[in-house]
Image: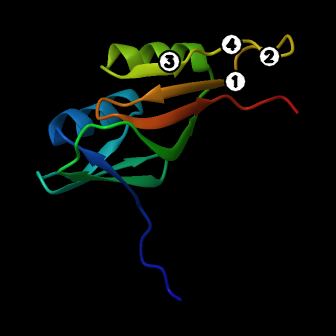
Amino acid sequence: MKVERFKYIIWAADMNRAVNFYATVFGGTILKQNEIISEVEICGGIIGIHGGGEGTRTWTGLSFQVPDVIEGAHEIVAAGGQLTREPEPENGEPPHLAMCLDTEGNEIMLSRKRGH
């Protein structure tokens, strides 16, 4: 099978708010934007944002590796997102995980590369 393109689709009740969140927080490039479907490229991957979402909490499976999850979690909240699990140290190491919600109720994860 020849795959021409790959993207992961999430839902948005407010398309402009969702596109702004991913473009701003994760430094994404807006490839396409309208009220039905928008696309934001982040680190070579494409998130498709589909309009018509209800704003309900939904697990996406999206994970973003960042150098510092505490700083990243602060940026999520500053951009209108929420934390569902605060970053906490584990086994004497700095936090490596933060569970978050974007502005549309989509659950996303921040992670930090571990030394092992």
Q: Is residue 100 above or below residue 13?
A: above
Residue beneath the point at 74% across and 12% down: 89
Q: Which residue is mark 4?
A: 88
Q: Are marks 4 and 3 in contact (CB under 8 Å)?
A: no
Q: Secondary structure at mark 2?
A: loop
Q: Which residue is mark 2?
A: 90
Q: Secondary structure at mark 1?
A: loop
Q: CA distance from mark 3 to mark 1?
A: 11 Å
Choose top left, top right, bottom left or bottom right for residue 79. Answer: top left
Q: Secondary structure at mark 3?
A: helix
Q: Earlier in the sequence, mark 4 or mark 3?
A: 3
Q: Which residue is mark 1?
A: 96
Q: x, y percentage for residue 41?
A: 38, 50
Q: Are marks 3 and 1 in contact (CB under 8 Å)?
A: no
Quadrant showing the C terminus: top right
Q: x, y percentage for residue 110?
A: 57, 30
Q: Which residue is mark 3?
A: 73
Q: Earlier in the sequence, mark 4 or mark 1?
A: 4
* Amino acid on which the number 2 mark rests in the picture: Glu
* Amino acid on which the number 3 mark rests in the picture: Ala
**Image-based side of 101 in relation to 2, left or right:** left
Residue beneath the point at 85% across and 10% down: 92
Q: x, y percentage for residue 11?
A: 29, 48
Query: Is label 2 or label 1 in front?
Result: 2
